[in-house]
Image (cartoon, grey):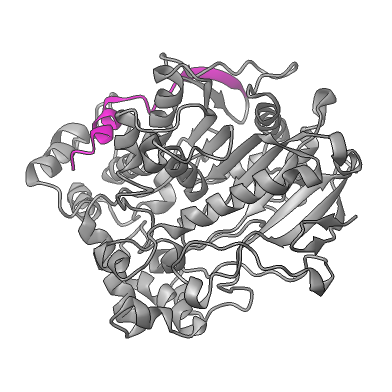
Amino acid sequence: PVVDLSYALYAPQIVDSPDSRTYYNFSNIRYAAPPVESLRFQLPADPINNRSAGIQDGTYGKICPQAYTPWQSTAAVQAPPGVAESEDCLFLDVVVPQDVWSQRCNASRPVIVWIHGGGFQIGSKWGTPLTNPLGLLDRSFDDDGEGAIWIGLQYRLGAFGFLQGDSFETAGGVPNVGFFDQRKALDWVQQYVSLFGGDASRVTVMGESAGAGSILHHLTAYGGEKDAPQFQQAILQSPAYVPRPYASQAEDSFSVLLSTANVSTLAELGGLDTYDLQVANKLSQTSDFYGTFQFGPAPDGSYVPELPEKLLASGQYHKDVKVIVAHNTFEAEKYTDPAATNSSDFDTYMDLYFPEANASVLEELSTSIYPAVYNDTSFPWSTPFDRLLVAISEFTFTCHAYFIGEALGAEVGADAYSYLFSVPPGTHTLDVYYSYYLNSTWSSTVTNVTTAHYLQRYLTTFAAQGDPNQEGLPSFPIYGSDHTDLNLNETFVNTLTDPAANSRCDWWRQASY
């Protein structure tokens, strides 16, 4: 098989799933020109015509430059850029069932577009076994399903994709350019997915952590006033971003990068050798406090006019999108300092997260919203560590899911669904292993295959019909004004009221800090 994209020709790798179904993986398709030289820190450009190179087999392709923090791995911060990393990284994969490809001229199958997570600093489109899509796609054929096409995309990360601030923008940099990479890939899907048998009017974008946080930013792009999202449905698993409401935060991050790179202007930064800029991107992370990253999305007055929670609260978002949102029971366990065992540590960290908050706001956080009370079952914490964990979980992950469910479900009456992933230990990313369950050899993290298959069938059914319910599955209710979650556990599936629908999240929605 060969697909002709007009600017290039691609042939797939042929792979078989555990269900013995054959798939074509059109890997490392360029959806944009290499964002190097004059395109560094700029909007992505159309891919260059490369037909003269003949048929490409997908073996060439790099991941975007990665950057770890000391609290993740000091060794990774100090390691030189990996050979697999390159600024020339704007590639995507298209995985098509052989059955769909053979009928591509009139197939019109649903499309799932995956935006990977990784704190806006690390990650790539395909990471076996974490995001090998074959198991998920197998479930799209269950109960006489029509199958689906899966597309994974890459976008610029860290300093390459998420700089902002007056100094950066005045010098000609495009803020939050990683989001524009994602939009470029979604534009590509609209233009070319029919060549693979996909339906451009049935696109579900799916992401976890920073990937889901990205989708939330697309839902609130331009305050909902223009450039509607290039998808009809969205699955947002643990939508993550650390609120960065202060202009000084973006300025400080840009200054750290300049200083680390030993330059003083964006022009000098743009002229650096790629190796030197990758090193600066990595070493800029050394000042991150526990659980955070140096670079990430922040308001820019344009694509991101304000924090998404404020835009959702004021009705400034794109409303004609069906969604599934999700969060896990202990989202921030990996992002909470294990040394935070004293009540005073809460105040220390809130001051770090919100350095310009008024003293009265910080006091309200500490005494009223998250009081240091450890023997009252009405609060979901019993130790100082758990108190900090709950706060970070809520303002980084779970409240975002609640806000989306309310805005697109309870508020405008669109179809919104929400699940709580409570399989022990309920930590961040665990449901991704279940979403992409392949088999026991690859996915030893999965302890209950039935739960994995339930989740996969919910997701693929939603992609196909905008409703996750299917015969043979436990009923998945709409989120609605009563904030109903489907609770996916290791031993049972039931419903409950979303634990994120609480007064603490209502406080965060105001963004009064």
Whether residue 421 appears in this view of the structure is no
Verify whether residue 422 appears in magenta.
no
| The image quarter in which residue 35 lies | bottom right
Which is more toward the observer, 384 or 180?
180
Q: Nearer the viewer, residue 105 or 443?
A: 105
Location of residue 454 in the rendering, given as x and y in whole percent from the top left corner: 69, 28
Q: Is residue 200 visible?
A: yes
Looking at the rendered image, the quarter that the C terminus falls into is top left
Q: Which residues are magenta?
A: 492-513
For the point 66% across and 17% down, the residue is 474
| Residue positioned 60% across, 52% down in the render | 185
Percent position of residue 451, x then y: 67, 31
Q: Quick check: 379 above or below 265?
A: above
Can you say which quadrant of the picture contains the N terminus?
Answer: bottom right
Find residue 272 and report its image quarter. bottom left
Residue 374 percent location from the top left of the image? 24, 34
117 vs 255: above or below: above
